[in-house]
Amino acid sequence: MSSVGENQASPDVLIVGAGPAGLSAAIELKKRGVAQVVVIEREREAGGVPRHCFHPGFGLQDLRRNLTGPNYAQRLVSKAQDLGVEIATSSTVNAIAPDKTTRVTSPHGILDLHPRFVLLTTGVRERPRSARLVPGTRPAGVFTTGQLQQWVGLKKFPVGTRALVVGAEHISFSAVQTLRHAGVSCVAMVTDHPRHQSLWGASLLIRAVYQAPLLLGTELIEILGTHRVEGALLRNVASGSVEKIDVDTIVFTGDWVPDAELAYRSAIEISPLTRGPMVESDGRTSVDQIFAAGNLVQPAETAGIAARRGTEAAMHIANQIYQPIVAQRIVIPLECDESLLWVTPQRLVLNEELERLYFRTRLFSSKKFLAVRQGDRVLGRYRLRHTSPNRGLSVPGAWSKDVEKESGPVRIALCD
Amino acid sequence: MNETEANFDIAIIGGGVVGCAIARELSGGSLTVALFESSSDLGNGTSKANTAIWHTGFDTVPGSLESSLVHRGYEKLGIFAEQTGIALERTGAVLVAWDEEQAAALKNLQEKALANGVVDTEIISAEEVIRREPHLGEGVQGGLVVPGEGIIDPWSVTLAFANLAVLRGVKLFRSTPILGITEAQDRHLLETHQGSYGARWLINVAGLYSDVIDRMIGHEGFTITPRRGQLLVFDKLARPLLSGIVLPVPTERTKGVLVSPTVWGNLLLGPTAEDLDDKGDTRSTSDGVKALLADGKRILPRLMDYDVTAVYAGLRAATEHRDYQITSYPNERYVCVGGIRSTGLTGSLGIAEYVAELLRSAGVEIPSGKGLESGFTMPPLGECQIRPLQDPNKISEDPAYGTVLCHCEQVSLGEVRDACHAMIAAENLEGVRRRTRALNGRCQGFYCGAEVVDVVARELGTAPESLMGFQ
Ligand SMILES: Cc1cc2nc3c(=O)[nH]c(=O)nc-3n(C[C@H](O)[C@H](O)[C@H](O)COP(=O)(O)OP(=O)(O)OC[C@H]3O[C@@H](n4cnc5c(N)ncnc54)[C@H](O)[C@@H]3O)c2cc1C
Ligand SMILES: Cc1cc2nc3c(=O)[nH]c(=O)nc-3n(C[C@H](O)[C@H](O)[C@H](O)COP(=O)(O)OP(=O)(O)OC[C@H]3O[C@@H](n4cnc5c(N)ncnc54)[C@H](O)[C@@H]3O)c2cc1C
């Protein structure tokens, strides 16, 4: 555990959360010469979620290396520390007052810091069984992927013998791997969508390597068992037929929700779609001098994208530190239609070019293009690589220079 | 079986909130008292799964035993909670009428309240209801304010009673179901897996199974039909939507569901009312959940913007009678305390006092019950209290109180450790949850699940898998 020193009571930038987004932002701020950058992390170790993703595939985008999660996390931490970033672990940010007074609790006590800027990078979690309203008894043996990874990877605890995986997106396939690693056989994977939402070939791989059938158009309707999970009832959405499956472990995967309590408590405006803070194109929230980035804003992306978004927010914060502006900012809302689950940023700034636009579809669609419109004008039209729900999508923001002041909100939608 | 493991003057069967309240009341005198609980923890039956409302008893049946004991219990519990540091918030309640029929019923309810000794209710207009609770849905016709209603931490109440009882000499047997009862000359013989115990007096407070115990003694005073109540606990972020408890107006047709804050800062929606055959069926069902959500959407539409943190169900010990079934059989040295249906948390101290009276009048020497608390306090778990993580003194005394273990519920390592070593210690994760709130939050273990299991296994000296429900 490391704590915040006396001389860091008023840092230039305070970052909440030492995951890929927070650490990448800290590194960027230091590279740009910002003097005091403090990162507050509530876990004993910095690094965020990758700390417990014990498989390769991390760092490809930002570090140009293929690393395991823990190695990737360690590299980001070392890089930040080498540049002089202060990282306080076992330290929780409880509240940020309107004047930016930030209350931190740690084993050293309760401390108030007075940063100039705050960046929130507190990440996401998966919705647990209760939030998905899956009825039945309440036995042990019900996990989320995040919990399972820590269980297996960090603690090496035994899990069970036969598992059901709920969900069929990237993370769900990770869960299958983790189960396999723990010696648990994955009896089935279920999704209520008509197809899985991961990379092409993922289901073949699952079937060939892990022998787990992927049940499409199927939902989990009840959990059985007294002390321990003893089974589950699955229903075929189309036919309505119900089947009992014999498992002692159930893993709920994906279905992301930002861990946004601190943002709520700091009176930051929350997007009803992402359930994370609303941000402008540069990452600023509705509260002055507070920015947000990473999975907290975009639930959820790969670590590489979260890192990149952290870096971008840091660039904008550094700009504000060096050139405390200036002209009045004119903000135009950015909205999406029903075909999309969410879009971010939720606010465009007139005459500021947007880097990229990030969004998610709600369902698989035959419409393969995204249209960006303001009023009757089509600002852009982009062919999409896929329309998988739960899988990252983004398009360039070059059209943002054509946004007009008086023409109302910019709207995006899937189109033919 | 002639040899007994031990003999007691009084044996209490059932360690729910009522049984523990009775144990506390009867403790501290010259008589030996034992409390038998079948589960590994106290309050593991109906007492753990209720709506946690500190009832004035305004809508009980006037003149009933329940009415007088809830009234008495209400007063005593208010004082008790204050003395022992148990979270209790005097939020007040408003019964909201959504149609003409309900609006017309308010007057009768007010009179009923008066007959139950609740004198400070007030009928208010729709505008006034909305001023108090601005997030209510469309269609409010008026309301009845019951200022005395409040919310309480039900788990700590049961544990506090049990702790005080044990401190004052009661012998506690957990994981000890009473399997059968036989009669010897001057005592009852209680059969358990560990052997048999003798008791001169027997008090049956076995909740849903009080009819089964009653039959073991040879009585058939009543039959219990479990009435299930499913409840949804909403994210703490929803707490600002309500200022106090919003109660339904019961009519001939429906009882309706309530929305209430909890002392932990969540909002609670429920309960359903379903008559069942199975005394163990605490499942939630998709129909139950759907019905609650439909009601929630109507009562407090914005509640639907928030995630559900927990779904649970409790079983009311309903009988064919409307009142509590409390009967003393002095000749048999037996008191039956059954049918404590939907007010037992509030009524517990009133019931305990009444049972002590019944025993006294049968010539049993029960201490006066004065000064039972003697400075004992429970850990602060409520949002209205100062939790260890908010207390600089506590943290500087012991940094474990500044080490967050469960982030969502803000529970420190020190609290979880303490729960594992308390006088009536947690024996499993459930026990830790109820003593500390750890794992009860919105992430349900995504962040801290593995770490909490690690700490609890270490502190209890057991293997982690033994905490994961494998028998
Ligand atoms: C289970 C799981 C598996 C994944 N697998 C992969 C994968 O295989 N490949 C991949 O590319 N991506 C994967 N991802 C996604 C990737 O891990 C995330 O995109 C990335 O970690 C997001 O970075 P972040 O910095 O936004 O958030 P996080 O990594 O979640 O970091 C947030 C940090 O903030 C801290 N924090 C939160 N609140 C507070 C507070 N109040 N005070 C102090 N600290 C706080 C948290 O403890 C945490 O360390 C996975 C995600 C999950 C959840
Ligand atoms: C949905 C719901 C909502 C409610 N809301 C409220 C409320 O808001 N306010 C309020 O005041 N009350 C409320 N109640 C009522 C209250 O919860 C009960 O009245 C109270 O918990 C009853 O306590 P008890 O000790 O009688 O029973 P229990 O808590 O059921 O305890 C009985 C104990 O006996 C044990 N036992 C059974 N058989 C044996 C045996 N053979 N040997 C040993 N031990 C045995 C059981 O394990 C159990 O622990 C509610 C109830 C429900 C179901």
Image (cartoon, rainbow, N blue to C red):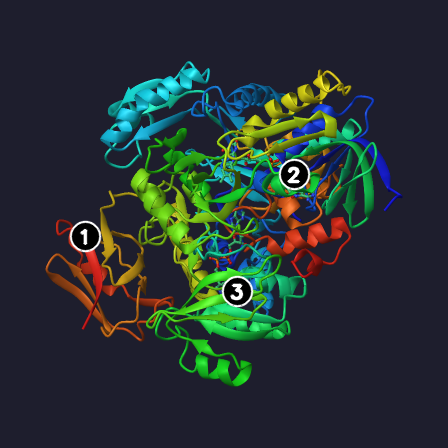
Secondary structure of the residue carrying tag 3 is: strand
Amino acid of disc 1: Pro
What is the chain letter for disc 2?
B
Side (left or right) of B205 relative to B407? right
Residue picked out by circle 2: B214
Q: Are marks 3 and 1 on the same chain?
A: yes
B343 or A398, which is in the foreground? Answer: B343
**In this rendering, which labeled residue sits more in front, label 3 or label 1?**
3
Q: Residues within 10 Å of mark 2 (few under 14, many from 20)?
A: many
Q: Secondary structure at mark 2?
A: helix
Give the secondary structure at mark 1.
loop
Disc 1 or disc 2, which is closer to the eye? 2
Distance (Cα) linking label 3 and label 1: 40 Å
Q: Which residue is mark 1?
A: A409
The answer, for residue A284, to whether it is visible in the render is no
Kindly indicate the quadrant of the structure image that contains residue B139: top left
Q: Residue at x 71, y 15 (%)?
A: B370
Q: Chain of mark 3?
A: A
Task: State which quadrant residue A295 falls in.
Answer: bottom left
Task: Give coordinates of residue A50: x percent, y percent.
Answer: 55, 63
Pointer 3: what residue? A251
